[in-house]
Image (cartoon, helix red, strand yellow):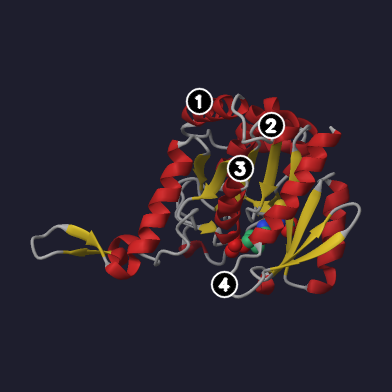
Amino acid sequence: MDETTSFFESAPLLKDADNITSKLTQFIDQNSSSLSGSSGPRRVVCVTSGGTTVPLEQRCVRYIDNFSSGHRGATSTEYFLKSGYSVIFLNRRGTCQPYCRSLPDDPLLECFELTNDSCIQVQESHSEAVKTAIREHHAAVSGGLLLKLPFTTIFEYLQILRLIATSMKILGANGMFYLAAAVSDFYVPWDSMAVHKIQSASGPLDMRLAQVPKMLSVLRKEWAPTAFCVSFKLETDKEILLEKADKALKRYKMHAVVANELSTRKELVILVTDTAKVSVYRENHNSDVESPLIKLLVDKHSTFIKNT
Ligand code: 9Z3
């Protein structure tokens, strides 16, 4: 049995799989039969966002996590929607959500106040931000243009990604994958994982982590062979970033790889394709690097559709 098959066969059953599949079928049916302005059939992008956790116990008390805030995925989702795409937002529970960036960290407690007669009202200082967030989010969700699917663990993430990819197959070249989630490279296979909380009385913990199978290959070859695929490469050492991004582009046959360095990821990304490496900067401190990045990717996707 290959690594990918054994990952899925031993993964815990995805709760809610039927519900997710029916939401996906409905979303894709609706979007594949609708037109986007004058530019032909509506394009659908799956944006992945936030980090995956790696549970250490089946009845999970402890897990390994990573830094990802979900800002890239949430911001990019807004720009894809603005560009006329429909978005399947596969996001880590509790991370940054589209249209919530201009709200305070605890919007419920910080945006609202009680009036003298115990009614709830929006505080004047947050009123514009709250109205815009509600209006734009509501328009996207109720218009059938944004489907949000949450995950927590690496098992949930990869199982839902597979469901999304296989349901997006019918979109052909109009489908895009924008894989911004920070996916764990290592995990504890479910069948070798402790069932109960690991006991500290047994002394120091030695643990061997298995490698997560490289799903980018499987996505390109089997799950979504006709879609436009963009993956991300993150490094902390900028000396090796471009070389690694180039390797990923070739090894996984991506159409583009977005290379970014941890400390500058909000200011600069480098779009690597087989013909060029383009540095993409945010315009100023108040703008988003995702704005020019999504513009470039939309153009590349258009060329890809034309040539397919
Ligand atoms: C990224 O590189 C994203 O841009 C960030 C965004 C995770 C840095 P934030 O969520 O950060 O806005 O805080 N995502 C991909 C990271 C990743 O795991 N890439 C793998 C790799 O580098 C390939 S799939 O090996």
Residue type at numbered disc 3: Gly
Tag nearer the camera, 1 or 2: 2
Q: Which amino acid does label 1 sit on?
A: Ser
Disc 3 to disc 1, C-alpha distance: 24 Å
- Relative to 164, say whether 93 is above or below: below
Question: Alpha carbon of mark 2 to alpha carbon of mark 4: how far?
Answer: 33 Å
Q: Which structural element holds mark 3?
A: loop
Distance from Cα at disc 3 to Cα at disc 4:
23 Å
Of mark 1 and mark 4, the one earlier in the sequence is 1
Can see residue 295? Answer: yes
Q: Earlier in the sequence, mark 2 or mark 4?
A: 2
Q: Name the residue under label 4.
A: 286
Helix, strand or loop under label 4 = loop
- Which residue is rendered at x = 84% and y = 32% of the image? 308
> Disc 3 marks which residue?
84
How many other residues sit within 10 Å of disc 3, few (<14), some (14-19) or many (≥20)? Answer: some
Q: Nearer the viewer, mark 3 or mark 1?
A: 3
Nearer to us in this view, 16 or 278: 278
**Cα distance, mark 1 to mark 4?**
39 Å
Residue type at tag 4:
Asn
Q: Which of marks 3 and 1 is nearer the N terminus?
A: 1
